[in-house]
């Protein structure tokens, strides 16, 4: 029971996204119907240099079923936790990589995650303490995959030389350099929560490679791919492929290449839906943060 309550506390702290309360401001240049509604299936916008424009406010499109500990709760269950039905606003693509969940990045991978013995033991230990050290539960940066899957919005700002992603959750900020630079050697710069990211365009796809991440060896809050604690190490390398096939959809394929944690690389698809005419809000996670000190684990 205590572990279930601890999990509910983590959900309450990280997974509730409130509608934006900023004054409404219509997005300029968005395709609209006669009633002024944004046409989500409209054409992909492009920048002045002809690249697909990823700029916009985005929210993860696919909602997860609740984890087993919260199964049976509907609408607002215990402790006011919002438990959403599993939905997908976009038709499933049978050719795409499997969809992850916020709880388990490998939930839909055939055969599950290819964990090494080191990673399996670490994940077991993390789940055994109700994931109390998950960085999101401690108002710390969540890392690349958790931020992509976090059910709170993020803003992408694209320039020719730099793409910035501003996350509402935990006030995260990530830079992707697109000025032609290469990744630095592994271990050369100080490891970052989001690593060091360099991007390049391959046709209409932005390919981003990231290394020099703070892996699980760095500390208990580091190297979490999901809430369940699937780890990544200091040796991890991420490859992301961003595509905007229509106006209102962003596809992100994430490949995790980490020989210390996984016996082979694996790839998942994380869909994003445009939050037209909305803006992320200020979100100060550690303001009056109380729940973690109350968590008790048998």
Image: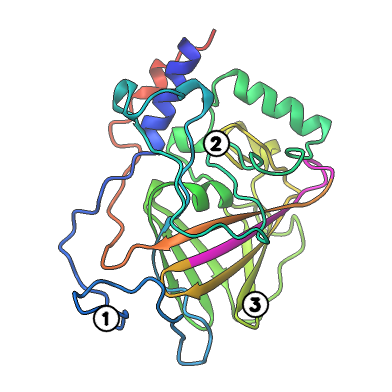
Determine the secondary structure under disc 1.
loop
Residue located 31% across and 47% down the image = 283
Check contact, mark 1 vs mark 3: CB within 8 A: no
Determine the secondary structure under disc 2.
loop
Q: Residues within 10 Å of mark 1 (few under 14, many from 20)?
A: few
Q: Is residue 229 above or below residue 124?
A: below
Which dot, 1 or 3, sits closer to the camera?
Answer: 1
Q: Can residue 95 be found in the magenta stretch?
A: no
Residue 210 in percent (x, y) is at 66, 61
Residue located 65% across and 83% down the image = 203
Residue located 82% across and 46% down the image = 259
Ranked by sequence position, the earlier of labels 1 and 2 is: 1
Residue that label 1 marks? 28
Q: Which mark is residue 120?
A: none
Q: Is residue 266 left or right of residue 3?
A: right
Q: Which mark is residue 103?
A: 2
Cα distance in 3D space between marks 3 and 2: 30 Å
Q: Classify residue 180 by image quadrant.
A: bottom right
Q: Can I make out residue 193 in this image?
A: no
Ranked by sequence position, the earlier of labels 1 and 3 is: 1
Residue 158 in percent (x, y) is at 46, 76
Point out the stretch of residues depicted in magenta: 250-263
Residue that label 3 marks? 200
């Amino acid at each position: 029971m205590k572990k279930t309550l601890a999990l509910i506390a983590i959900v309450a702290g990280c997974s509730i996204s409130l509608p934006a309360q900023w004054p409404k401001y219509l997005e300029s240049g968005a395709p609209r119907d006669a009633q002024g509604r944004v046409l989500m299936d409209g054409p992909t916008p492009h920048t002045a240099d002809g690249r697909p424009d990823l700029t916009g406010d985005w929210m993860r499109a696919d909602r997860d079923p609740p984890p087993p500990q919260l199964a049976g709760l509907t609408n607002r269950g215990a402790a006011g936790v919002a438990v959403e039905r599993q939905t997908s606003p976009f038709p499933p693509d049978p050719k795409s990589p499997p969809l992850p969940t916020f709880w388990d990045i490998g939930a839909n991978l055939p055969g599950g995650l290819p964990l090494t013995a080191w990673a399996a033991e670490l994940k077991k230990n993390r789940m055994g303490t109700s994931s109390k050290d998950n960085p999101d539960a401690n108002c710390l940066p969540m890392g690349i995959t958790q931020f992509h899957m976090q059910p709170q919005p993020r803003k992408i700002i694209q320039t020719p030389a730099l793409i910035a992603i501003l996350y509402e959750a935990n006030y995260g900020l990530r830079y992707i350099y697109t000025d032609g630079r290469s990744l630095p050697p592994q271990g050369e710069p100080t490891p970052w929560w989001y690593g060091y990211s360099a991007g390049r365009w391959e046709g209409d796809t932005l390919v981003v490679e990231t290394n020099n991440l703070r892996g699980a060896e760095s500390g208990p809050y580091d190297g979490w791919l999901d809430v369940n604690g699937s780890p990544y190490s200091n040796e991890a390398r991420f490859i992301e492929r961003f595509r905007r096939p229509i106006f209102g959809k962003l596809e992100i394929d994430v490949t995790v290449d980490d020989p210390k944690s996984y016996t082979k690389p694996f790839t998942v698809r994380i869909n994003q839906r445009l939050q037209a005419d909305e803006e992320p809000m200020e979100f100060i996670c550690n303001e009056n943060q109380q729940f973690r000190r109350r968590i008790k684990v048998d």
